Image (tube, rainbow, N blue to C red):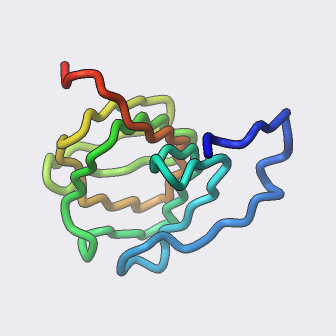
Amino acid sequence: MPKPEHEFFDVEKVSYTRCAGDVPTLAERILAADAASGTATRILHFEPGTDTTPNGVQVHDFWEEVYIVSGSLTDLELGETFTAGMYACRPPGMRHGPWRSDDGCTTFEVRYRTDSPRP
């Protein structure tokens, strides 16, 4: 089944749920998803002090686009900090994280699969 049809709605009505893995201060709001394909749109929230080291470096088999809405994230492997207003487009297989967010962070993410070759 494809993602559901939604007209504008208050995303605050969608509860945060704890993300899979070993980091209890990492939560997501799934706004729309297609379980069959893994396609999803979500808001990801890092509480202040969140460290995703227990989850390790992430590598996905799908595309992931991320926009930082508020706060900041430090990629511990790269040693770089990314702040509100920054954007990432990650093709399948791209390594990223683990992350630390000293002040907290909220991102808007779209995940999808495509048959297009990696650029």
Q: Nearer the viewer, residue 109 or 105?
A: 109
Residue 29 coordinates in the image, percent (x, y): 63, 58
Q: Is residue 41 above or below residue 86?
A: below
Question: Which residue appears at 24% of the width and 56% of the height?
Answer: 58
Question: Which residue appears at 65% of the width and 47% of the height?
Answer: 32
Question: Which residue appears at 17% of the width and 47% of the height?
Answer: 95
Residue 26 coordinates in the image, percent (x, y): 48, 68
Question: Which quadrant is the C terminus positioned in?
Answer: top left
Q: Nearer the viewer, residue 33 or 109?
A: 33
Q: Nearer the viewer, residue 106 or 2?
A: 2
Residue 46 coordinates in the image, percent (x, y): 49, 62
In-image side of 118 versus 88 (left or right): left
Question: Which residue appears at 50% of the width and 52% of the height?
Answer: 36
Q: Is residue 84 above or below residue 1?
A: above
Q: Nearer the viewer, residue 4 or 57?
A: 4
In-image side of 83 versus 115 (left or right): right
Residue farthest to the top, as pictured: 119
Count the marks.
Answer: 0
In-image side of 78 versus 6 (left or right): left
In-image side of 59 versus 21 (left or right): left
- Determine which quarter of the picture holds residue 20: bottom left
- Determine which quarter of the picture holds residue 13: bottom right
Residue 66 coordinates in the image, percent (x, y): 44, 37
